[in-house]
Image: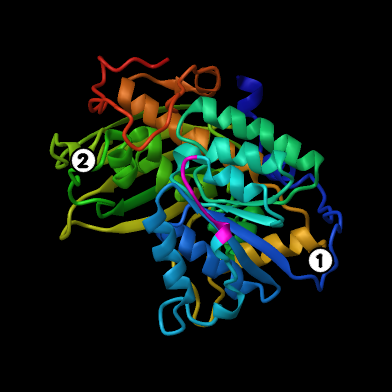
Amino acid sequence: METQRKLTRRALFQAAGAAPAVLSAQSRNAGDRLKAGVVGCGGRGTGAVFDLLSGNPNVELVAMADIFEDKLEQSLARLRDPQGRFAGIQDRIKVPAEHHFVGFDAYKKLLATDIDIVLLTTPPGYRPEHFEAAVEAGKHIFAEKPFATDPAGVRRVLAASEKAAEKRLTVMSGAQKRSDPETLEVIDRIRNGEIGEVVAAHVRYLSGPVMHARRREPHWGDMEWQHRNWYSFVWLCGDQIVEQHFHNIDIVNFLLGAHPERVVASGGAAWRPRESLYGNIYDHMSSEFVYANGVRMFSHCRQYPQGCYREVSEVIIGTKGIIQLPQTRRPGGVNPQVQEHINMVKSILGTGPYINHGKEVAESTLTCIMARESAYSGLEITWEMIMASKQDLQPKAFGYDLKMDEPPLPVPGQYKFV
């Protein structure tokens, strides 16, 4: 432990950046048009398609998959609307009727087509299964964050990301701060010693509640209801710290080139009623992470109703000063959600560095899960404990009318870490 604590800022950053840039194997010519498919046609999936196509004129959308037909058709209608929010890409929305895939196995049918790129944008509870299948199918991957909602899922992604590297498949994550030029500029300044040795970070995601259903329709079975209202259930969303606050925690891991070694967290539901609509997630959580070199990250996230204070920030504290990472773009700056797709396509075509975010973003996902489990259980959770955890939240059967019990809100002292 003492040896670990003697790691210097310079040694840590050098280790993080030791791997040289490697160009992706050029299986296609730089001028070729790439074909993409999307799995998960909600708001984020629709937005990801637009980001990909608006940043890359040599890409077209040719296939779509979702467990709900209405979600798929609504997304496609929005993408095809030349007067709507996604204007400017309509000539590259080429999804024939036979490439509308619906159902719990729709992703398998989409991956069997001749697409080059798959966008994985379902609720994160499905990310490990879809990620594994995409790697096996030999597709380049954009995977929205986080990469899982439980330790078992993270381990699946870690293994699959190694296979992706062996196949030279590009893996780009939705951790867009990693692709933001302004954020990277500030991180370079920190790494070059502008504020001295980093000793701490304060990160916040203080936002409003996220809802995906207002009521349960009479004809919805239990599983359909939980999917329609996915942000309220831990197995699908992972709770706010995993699904949303991930961004702030991930960029600190990226800055330090490491994951924390332990965490103590607390939280609860201050305003969310104990009703089916609100599921079993917390509405606030505070965490203190400790890295191997003694750096501490203080994390605070919450989803409180309209009228409450809002803030999203990362403040980095050093021995010579304090600096805040940018939260807004300069006028005329590139949207990092577009830039990440530009970088991905360059990696695929070999015109830029090879990218595989699999391991790092899986570890950031597990960092967030580690804090959630600490808050739920009331325990200090170490990296070794969370890596060895047997928690597997994924259902063993799927069906729109499948009977599913709604798990209770976790209570520290009663909730069991496994």
| Percent of width and height locating residue 11 | 71, 40
Q: Secondary structure at mark 1?
A: loop
- Marker disc for residue 351: 1
**Which of the pair 207/224 is nearer the observer?**
224
Q: Is residue 61 above or below residue 309?
A: below
Q: Are marks 1 and 2 in contact (CB under 8 Å)?
A: no
**Measured along the vertical axis of the image, is residue 238 above or below residue 388?**
below
Give the mark nearer the N terminus: 1 vs 2. 2
Q: Amino acid at mark 1?
A: Thr
> Residue 114 location, x and y as percent?
72, 56
Position in image of residue 119 (x %, y %): 58, 54
Q: Which residues are magenta?
A: 98-104
Classify mark 2: residues with Cα within 10 Å, few (<14), some (14-19) or many (20+). Answer: many
- Res. 3 visible in picture: yes
Q: Is residue 72 left or right of residue 251?
A: left
Task: Tell me the CA gap for discs 1 and 2.
Answer: 46 Å
Give me the residue at 40% from left, 48% from top. 244
Q: Dot 2 corresponds to which residue?
A: 278
Q: Nearer the viewer, residue 382 or 150?
A: 150
Disc number lying in front (1 or 2): 2
| Residue 136 is covered by the magenta coloring | no
Which residue is depicted at the point 25% across and 14% down?
A: 414
Identify which residue is drawn at 62% across, 73% down. 55
- Residue 88 left/right relative to 404: right
Q: Position of 415 compared to 252: left or right?
A: left
Q: Does the rendering let one see residue 189?
A: no
* Rendered-image quadrant of the N terminus: top right
- In depth, the one of 342 and 220 nearer the eye is 220
254 with respect to 167 (left or right): left
